[in-house]
C-alpha cells in the first residue's frame, strides 16, 4: 500500500496488485488490496534477511549500523527476482525502481516493528527488575 501511495501510478498498481474480482468481492468492501506473488516474495525475503541480521551472529554489527534501512534494502534487493514478472509501465517506471519502493516500505515497517519489540522487551526487563527490588526491600 505504501509503495502504491508513493508511486501514484495506475499502471504500476496493475503490476503490483492482483485484481481477482470474485476473490476480492467476497472478503472486502472495496479497499483491500491483494499483492502480486512477486511482492509477497520480496517482503518475505526481507523478513528472512532481517531475522538473519538480527541473529546473535550479526546483531551487534547490524544494530550499531547507522543506516539500517539502507543496509536491509541493499542486502535484500539482489535476492529478489522481479525482472521477469514486473514490466516497465506506460509512465516509464522501471521494475527496479518499483521494487525499490516496495522494499523501502517493507523495511520501514519491519524496522519499526523491531524497534517497538526491542523497546517493549527492555521496558519489561526494567519493570521486572524494579519489582524484584521492591519485593526484596
Image (cartoon, rainbow, N blue to C red):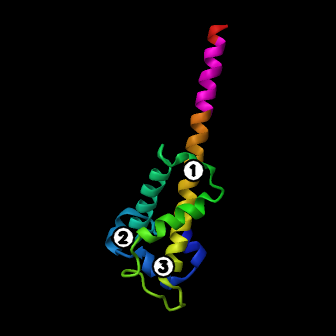
Residue that label 3 marks: 13
Which type of secondary structure does the marked residue at label 2 adopt? helix
Among all residues in the image, which is located at the extreme top?
137
Q: Residue at x 59, y 61 (%)?
A: 69
Q: Residue at x 57, y 41 (%)?
A: 118
In this rendering, the answer to whether 46 lies above or below 130 is below
Question: Which residues fall within the magenta stretch?
Answer: 123-134
Mark 3 neighbour class, 10 Å CA radius: few under 14, some 14 to 19, many 20 or more: many
Residue 104 spot, x, y in % from top left: 56, 67
Of 10 and 21, which appears nearest the observer? 10
Residue 61, labelled with which disc?
1
Q: Which residue is mark 2?
A: 37
Residue 83 lies in the magenta stretch: no
125 is within the stretch colored magenta: yes
> Residue 13: image x %, image y %?
48, 79
Tell me where residue 46 appears, x and y as whole percent. 46, 61
Q: Which residue is nearer to you in this view: 14 or 124?
A: 124
Q: What kind of element bears circle 1?
A: helix
Amino acid at each position: 500500500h505504501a509503495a502504491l501511495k508513493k508511486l501514484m501510478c495506475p499502471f504500476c498498481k496493475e503490476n503490483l496488485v492482483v485484481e481477482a474480482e470474485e476473490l476480492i468481492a467476497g472478503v472486502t468492501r472495496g479497499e483491500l488490496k491483494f499483492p502480486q506473488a512477486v511482492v509477497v516474495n520480496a517482503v518475505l525475503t526481507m523478513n528472512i534477511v532481517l531475522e538473519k541480521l538480527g541473529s546473535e551472529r550479526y546483531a551487534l554489527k547490524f544494530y550499531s549500523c547507522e543506516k539500517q534501512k539502507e543496509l536491509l534494502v541493499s542486502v535484500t534487493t539482489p535476492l529478489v527476482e522481479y525482472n521477469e514478472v514486473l514490466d516497465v509501465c506506460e509512465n516509464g517506471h522501471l521494475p527496479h525502481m518499483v521494487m525499490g519502493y516496495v522494499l523501502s516500505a517493507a523495511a520501514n515497517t519491519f524496522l519499526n516493528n523491531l524497534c517497538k519489540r526491542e523497546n517493549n522487551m527492555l521496558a519489561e526487563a526494567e519493570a521486572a527488575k524494579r519489582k524484584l527490588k521492591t519485593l526484596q526491600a
